[in-house]
Amino acid sequence: MKAIVQSAYGAPDDVLALRDVPQPSIRDDEVLVRVRAASMHPDIWHTVNGVPYALRIMGGGLRGPKNPVLGTDVAGEVEAVGGAVSRFQVGDAVFGEIVSGNQWTNGGAYAEYAAARESRLAPKPSGVTFEQAASVPTSALIALRAVRGEGRVRSGQSVLVNGAGGGVGTMAVQIARAAGAYVTAVDSSGKADMLRSIGAEHVIDYAQEDFTRTGERYDVIVDLAGNHRGGGCGRSSRLTAPTCSWATSTSTAAPTIAGSAASAASSA
Ligand SMILES: NC(=O)c1ccc[n+]([C@@H]2O[C@H](COP(=O)([O-])OP(=O)(O)OC[C@H]3O[C@@H](n4cnc5c(N)ncnc54)[C@H](OP(=O)(O)O)[C@@H]3O)[C@@H](O)[C@H]2O)c1
C-alpha cells in the first residue's frame, strides 16, 4: 500500500516521502480501516520534527520515529476486523484517533490502510463527510478535556473561548454551548458569523478589543491563543497543547478576569 513515510526527525521536505509499505496486520482487538481521509494538527508537526525532545523518550522513538507512518486522526471504511471485535463489521464507516496514550507518536493514518483498536473508533454519522469526521478527533478531545474536564462547565455558566475560530476552539464553543453555557468567542472578525452559527452568543474581534480589559467576568476561560501573558489565561502560552481552562470564581476580584485560577492547564 502507499503511505507517507518518515525516515528521521527533521523538516518535512527532508524526511517525508510517499512510499510502498506492507499493509498493517491486525490483532484480535483491532480493525483494519481503508482510509478515506486523515487530518493534520499541531501534534503532527511535533512528531515530524521530533521536538520537544521528551516525545522521543515518551515512546516516539529515540533515534528516529518508531512507527514510520505518520498520522493519528482517520476516517474510512472497515476493511477487516479482528476476532474479538464486536462493535464493527466490514463496510462500516468509522472515524477516530488511532494512537493510544501519548499523542506525540505516529499512528499510521497517512496510508491507504490503518490498523486501530476497536475502542479508538466510533461510527461515522451519515450526515458527516469522511473529511469532516477525520478533522474532529484530536481537536475535539482537547476541547472536551478543557471544557468538561479542567473547566467543568455547567449549564448557565459564562464561558469565554480565546482562539474560538480554530480547530480546537470551534469544538470548545459547541461543547460549552451544548452544556448550556453562555459562550463568548474571541477571534478575528471574519469568523464572527461562523462563530455565532455554532453557538456563540457574543463575539469579540481580538484586533479591536482586549477581552481582559472589558471588565466582563467569566466563570471559565478556555484559552487556546495564549496571547495574554499575565492576564486572562496567560500561562497557557507556555504550553505545547494549551488546553488551559481557567475555572474562575466570580466572587473574587482580580485585575483582568474575575477570580483566581481553580485549575491548571494540562497537555493533551
Ligand atoms: N488542533 C489540535 O488537534 C491540536 C493538537 C495539539 C495542540 N494544539 C494546540 O492548541 C492550540 C489551538 O490549536 P488549534 O488547532 O485550534 O489552532 P488554530 O486552528 O490555528 O486556531 C487558532 C485560532 O486562534 C486565533 N487567534 C490568533 N491570534 C489570536 C489572538 N491574539 N486572540 C484570539 N485568537 C487568536 C486564530 O485566528 P487567525 O485566523 O486570525 O489567526 C485561530 O482562529 C495551539 O496552541 C495548538 O498548538 C492543537
Image (cartoon, rainbow, N blue to C red):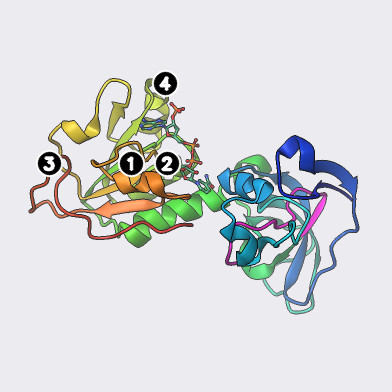
Residue 132 left/right relative to 92: left
At 65% from the left edge and 51% from the top edge, which residue is drawn? 50
Asked if the residue under mark 2 is in contact with the one under mark 4, i.e. CB atoms within 8 Å, the reply is no
User: SS class of the residue under badge 2?
Assistant: helix
Between the C-alphas of marks 3 and 4, the distance is 29 Å
Q: Is mark 4 within 8 Å of ligand 1?
A: yes
Of marks 3 and 1, the one in the foreground = 3
Q: Of the residues shown, which amino acid type is indicated by label 4?
A: Gly
Asked if the residue under mark 2 is in contact with the one under mark 1, i.e. CB atoms within 8 Å, the reply is yes
Please report whichever mark, 1 or 2, sits nearer to the chain's N-terminal start. Answer: 1
Number of labelled discs?
Answer: 4
Tell me the magenta residue range. 100-114
> Residue 169, labelled with which disc?
2
Between the C-alphas of marks 2 and 3, the distance is 25 Å
User: SS class of the residue under badge 1?
Assistant: strand
Identify residue for label 3.
255
Please report whichever mark, 4 or 1, sits nearer to the chain's N-terminal start. Answer: 1
Residue 214 rendering spot, x and y as whole percentages = 16, 31
Residue 221 seen in this snapshot:
yes
Q: Of the residues shown, which amino acid type is indicated by label 1?
A: Val
Check if residue 263 falls in the magenta segment.
no
Mark 3 closeness class: few <14, some 14–19, many ≥20 residues within 10 Å: few
Asked if the residue under mark 1 is in contact with the one under mark 3, i.e. CB atoms within 8 Å, the reply is no
Q: Of the residues shown, which amino acid type is indicated by label 3?
A: Pro
Compare residues 68 and 114 and report the one nearer the observer. 68
Q: Please identify the quarter of the rendering in which residue 117 is found.
A: bottom right
Between the C-alphas of marks 1 and 2, the distance is 7 Å
Identify residue for label 4.
190
